[in-house]
Image (tube, rainbow, N blue to C red):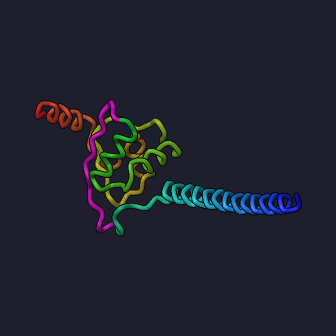
Amino acid sequence: MAKKRKKDTAYRAAVNGAKSVLRILVYICVILAIVFAGKTAYSFGYLIFDQHPMAATEEEGQDVTVIVKEDDSVYDIGKNLKAKGLIEDPVIFWAQEKLSDYSGKIKPGTYLLNTYENVNQMLSVLSGENTEGQPSQENSEKEESQEDSQE
């Protein structure tokens, strides 16, 4: 009987030790997950609020024509801007638009943007609030009809 009790005590001690080690490993995993989530959220937030132009200097900036169609979503516009070298990531552009004063104000048309403009400047142009240096809407309607006839 004494041997059995010794085995039970040793077994229970081993199980309790294993539970303690497992509990510590779970705590470490949870802490690492929280750190990873925090780092990812910080990086994403930094990208949203750090608005820098693609061109390093104004002299390096290039004018790019962008056409926004009536049924384009903000993400579609972001993909178009990325393809033209105006932004780095359409998802970040989408988030920046949602958090800006120009949320939901982008208008269809033809716009002249520069690679030295930051996202806020581009959004002010795309929403029609900054029309300085922009082609007139008559010209953009003609260009759109020409593009449609070419397709």
In the displayed structure, would residue 47 be above or below residue 142? below
Residue appearing at x 80%, y 63% in the figure: 10
| x, y percent for residue 39 | 57, 61
Which picture quadrant has residue 105?
Answer: top left
As drawn, the residue found furthest toward the front would be 1
- Span shown in magenta: 58-72
As drawn, the residue found furthest toward the left would be 150
Give whichever of 130, 143 is nearer the camera. 143
Residue appearing at x 42%, y 46% in the figure: 123
| x, y percent for residue 19 | 73, 57
| x, y percent for residue 82 | 32, 52
| x, y percent for residue 11 | 77, 59
The N terminus is located in which quarter? bottom right
148 relative position to 98: left or right: left
37 relative position to 105: left or right: right
Residue 60 in the magenta stretch? The answer is yes
146 relative position to 46: left or right: left
Number of marks drawn:
0
